[in-house]
Image (cartoon, grey):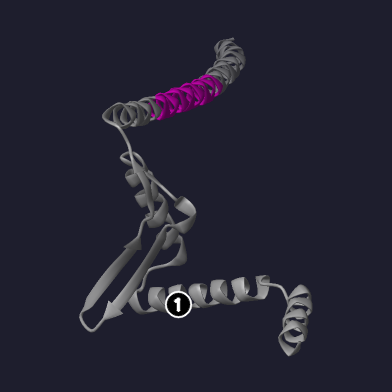
Amino acid sequence: MKDIFSDLYDRVLSFFTTQSSDDTKVMAKSRLRTVLMQDRVGFSERAMQMLKDDLIESISKYLEIDEESFDLSIDAKENATILNLSIPVLRTKTDEEIDEALNAQEKQKIEKTQEIVDELQELVKEKAQELAEQLTEESEGEVAQEEKEQNKNLEEQPKEENKTTKKGK
């Protein structure tokens, strides 16, 4: 009878306490461990995430893995840095799947390269247009300046002619 009540008590108590606090505790410990290791090794959180993403991408070409359970950590021991990986493999991929993944990756690279080339061509066109407009404005300004000088010279010539003709008379 005592077991029934203690079991009932445990169940009622478990209803009010959630396992999320345990999950939060585990997650906090994991994050703290990661931060401490990164601090010792000098590896930033961003770099860790980028490394993890790159490893997942590379490994996923050949193996089907559980990305949620993928674990990456860096430990520092005396004069060495140790990279620890835990990669839960669900299954290996067939040669056809690997070829397909590699072809898809190559296609993505080609598309990305073409996007970059298109952007660069557009930038070159814009810059060329800006330079052409700038040169046109400068040359128009020079032509206008030359016209002003010519007009000024033309205006001054009759005055000088009048002066010389008055002196001659």
Q: 30 above or below 109?
A: below
Number of residues whose C-alpha sits closer than 10 Å to that of mark 1, classed few (under 14), some (14–19) or many (20 or more): some
Residue furthest out toward the bottom = 2
The foreground one among 33 and 90 is 90
Image position of 6 (left or right of 35): right
Magenta span: chief secondary structure: helix
Q: Secondary structure at mark 1?
A: helix
Residue 135 rendering spot, x and y as whole percentages? 49, 23
Quarter of the figure with the N terminus: bottom right
Image position of 126 (left or right of 148): left
Quarter of the figure with the C terminus: top right
Which amino acid, mark 1? Arg
Q: 169 above or below 2?
A: above
Q: Residue at 40%, 73% (x, y): give it.
A: 38
Which residue corresponds to mark 1? 33
Residue 50 rendering spot, x and y as whole percentages? 42, 55
Q: Residue at 67%, 70% (x, y): give it.
A: 20
Residue 39, quarter of the rendered image: bottom left
Q: Which residues are magenta?
A: 111-138
Q: Is residue 83 magenta?
A: no
Residue 120, quarter of the rendered image: top left
Image position of 26 (left or right of 48): right
Q: Residue at 38%, 55% (x, y): give it.
A: 88
Circle count? 1
Residue furthest out toward the left = 79
Residue furthest out toward the front = 1
Q: 53 above or below 37?
A: above
Residue 58 rendering spot, x and y as whole percentages? 33, 44
Q: Is residue 124 magenta?
A: yes
